[in-house]
Amino acid sequence: MKLTDEQAEIVDAARDLDRPLRIRAFAGTGKTTTLLAIARTRKTRGARGLYLAFNRSIAEESQPKFAGTGVTARTMHALARRAVGERVRELIPGRARCVMDAGVLRRIPVPQGWNMYRLGGAVARTMAGYCASDDPEITRDHAVAALTAMVGDPETLPPGPARGRASAATRQLADGVTEMTRDWLAQSEASGTYTHDMYLKALERNPALCARAFAGQQYVMIDEAQDLNPVQSSILEQSGLPLVAVGDSYQQIYAWRGAEDALDRFGGDEFLLTGSFRFGAAVARAGMDILASRPDGGPDQALRGLGPGPIEGWVGPKGGVICRTNAGVIEASLDLSARGLSIHIDNFDHIVTEVESLDALRLGRREEIRSQAVQRFASWEEACAEAEYGPDGEMARLVTLVEDDGLEQIRGLERWMQRAGEPVVTICTGHRSKGLEWPAVRLWSDFTSIDELHDRFSEAHERGRLARVQAMEAWNVCYVAATRAMYRLVLSPDLQASLKAETARRQAAHAPGNDGPGV
């Protein structure tokens, strides 16, 4: 494949083996092609390198592509597992039951509604937060963050019993949870019983292990750098190797699980990939309109549509319906199946668990609640209160679904998928759509207006940096979803109308002779 001028410039710069590079690549702009060209160029100089992928499926798919280039494709966890090696005698999931089995829980005063299982969940969440950080020790801040995720943020909950319980949980449990998490870490290191997150953190904490992980390599290429968490960034920095970091800051959508944009953290000369081979001018324009409506005005550079390419021999569903929420996935699935369309519902088991848990909460069967998101509610009334006051409408949709006998409807969807045959449409959330593409894409109606996104951002502004980052990511999710389309993109009515109005306002503000308000 002939390289674009942007790609050729990057590959030419990469001939210097000691030169770190940062590549900001818009959606569909040929990241893998560029990295392969870098690997081939460096192979001619005898260089060996690593390509670190976001997940195992991408790593496995990429390894044959890098054959003969001197580059090995792995995930960060696979790299760590090989280095930590014999220290890991047993792998366990990071769940409440594992904490309880470890015997580190202690009887401490707990708020009403808490038990040892829930306390174990708080310890497990605290450990996960610590392991995702680049902090040297487990602190009270990790416990507070875990408890807030479980019971809600006392600073943002509406006045009432829920806020009081959240405040009491943080006040009464944070110190004890911190100590129990430290005990669990010490016991795990002594026994060799680790979660996946724990052995990744062990690599970061031990310079000798880190050196072992990168032995024999001369450079590292890291994909999706905008979604690295701090511990992963720290490991890469400790390697001491020149990095080729590739990512798109406008596809950062995982701040809620600790991701930070490492493109701003790593050094090196910066290059751009702006020409997308996935789609043409219309989809590129929609993506840019979404980003330009962000509070910061979006990128200075324009996304260009160089495609789409031919789709002869396309395998799988030709359409994707992308929703903002799991509740939207259910609504879209019910709507399309009622029309007789054969569908595939992505992450269906997780969605069923959410609805089943809410139904169990409504019926007072707490022992049947398997969803962590639902476990934080003390009662059905509390869930209904969040449905009324919640910031994004997700709980309102789910509560309405459960009240309208939605569980039976969902079970009907399962039966429909089994008998409807080969799916023609995939239904998923914006987060789950990342890395995928379809000839035609529709954004579901739960992608709301730009005005609503601005309202949420304004409200988050008072709650600190992380809340602002998460609110800004709402634009990024829209951008990710829209740029999954190859030929045809249909936006939700509210989003389309608000984008049109926003674009008109922006164009009027920049029209010749408009110098803005007087002073």
Image (cartoon, grey):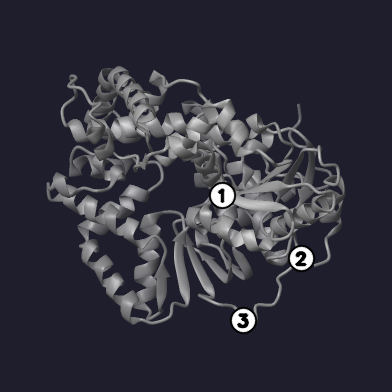
Callout 2–callout 3 Cβ contact below 8 Å = no
Residue 376 visible here: no
Q: Amino acid at mark 3?
A: Gly
- Which structural element holds mark 2? loop
Q: Quadrant of the C terminus?
A: top right
Image spot of residue 310 (x, y percent): 69, 77
Residue 446 visible here: yes
Image spot of residue 43 (x, y percent): 80, 52
Q: Which mark is residue 54?
A: 1
Q: Nearer the viewer, mark 3 or mark 1?
A: 1
Nearest the eye: 300 or 194: 194
| Residue hosting label 2 | 306
Residues under labels 2 and 3: Cα distance? 21 Å
- Which structural element holds mark 1? loop
Q: Residue, x 52% and y 73% (percent of image)? A: 319
Q: Amino acid at mark 1?
A: Phe
Residues under labels 3 and 1: Cα distance? 27 Å
Q: Amino acid at mark 2?
A: Leu
Nearest the eye: 44 or 117: 44
| Residue hosting label 3 | 313
Q: Earlier in the sequence, mark 1 or mark 2?
A: 1
